């Protein structure tokens, strides 16, 4: 049992490091298409973290919805709006903007860390976090049905808006 726990910790840190690297490349990449593809690495890392948490249903949903649908929507939006797809030097922000972004990132990380520590402290959860697929689907299609449908309509409107913007001429 101890060896498995150590292997899960090692896998977590490797996946987390890849996710952090991919997230940094998303915001520092000067090519918009490459930034969207780096986002694929980050979202795949989230699915891998879900698998480590034994939440296979959420991991498959992550792959289908975000890697399958949202990234395709981003790529279609980039291509349909005739955005420059090559390297663009105008995407690089000034040093002042980068410092402000770093400061806000550190502040948000501090607030989130404090909130998690204050909310959970040293509490051990054990098997309380694992939900069965039936419980997740029941909550999605009963408690969260309206937000689920609103998000799907919002994504459909975004796709139609991208097509309308691309077809203006």
Image: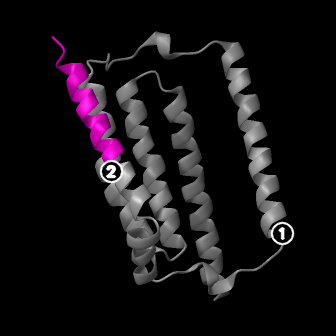
Quadrant for residue 149, please give it: bottom left
Mark closer to the observer (2, 1): 2
Look at the image and give the residue range highlighted in magenta.
Answer: 153-169
- Say which quadrant the N terminus sits in: bottom right
What residue lies at 16% left-to-right and 19% top-to-bottom? 167
Q: State the mark number for residue 4.
A: none
Residue farthest to the bottom? 1
Is residue 73 located in the magenta-colored stretch of the structure? no
List the residue tagged with mark 1: 121
Q: Where is residue 8 in the image (x, y as percent from the top left)?
A: 59, 73
Q: Where is residue 64 in the image (x, y as percent from the top left)?
A: 31, 59
For label 2, the SS is helix
Is residue 161 located in the magenta-colored stretch of the structure? yes
- Say which quadrant the C terminus sits in: top left
What residue lies at 27% left-to-right and 21% top-to-bottom? 81
Quadrant for residue 126, please give it: bottom right
Rendered position, 162 above or below 42:
above
Q: State the mark number for residue 152.
A: 2
Specify how the rendered protein is coloured: one colour
- Give the crowd class for mark 2: few <14, some 14-19, many >=20 residues within 10 Å: few
Q: Where is residue 117 in the image (x, y as percent from the top left)?
A: 82, 62
Q: In this view, does 16 lie to the left or right of 33?
A: right
Rendered position, 112 above or below 54:
above
Marker count (numbered):
2
Looking at marks 2 and 1 on the same chain, the residue that comes earlier in the sequence is marked by: 1
Rendered position, 89 above or below 48:
above
Q: In this view, does 25 lie to the left or right of 156?
A: right
């Amino acid at each position: 049992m101890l060896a498995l726990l150590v292997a899960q910790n090692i896998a977590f840190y490797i996946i987390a490091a890849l996710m952090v690297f991919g997230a940094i490349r998303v915001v520092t990449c000067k090519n918009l298409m490459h930034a969207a593809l780096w986002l694929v690495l980050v979202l795949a890392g989230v699915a891998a973290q879900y698998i480590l948490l034994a939440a296979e249903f959420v991991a498959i949903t992550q792959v289908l919805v975000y890697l399958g649908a949202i990234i395709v929507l981003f790529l279609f939006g980039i291509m349909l709006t005739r955005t420059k797809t090559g390297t663009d030097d105008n995407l690089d922000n000034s040093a002042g903007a980068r410092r402000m972004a770093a400061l806000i990132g550190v502040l948000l990380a501090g607030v989130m860390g404090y909130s998690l520590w204050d909310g959970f402290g040293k509490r051990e959860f054990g098997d309380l976090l694992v939900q069965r697929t039936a419980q997740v689907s029941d909550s999605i299609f009963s408690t969260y049905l309206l937000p689920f449908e609103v998000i799907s309509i919002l994504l459909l409107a975004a796709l139609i808006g991208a097509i309308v913007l691309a077809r203006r001429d």
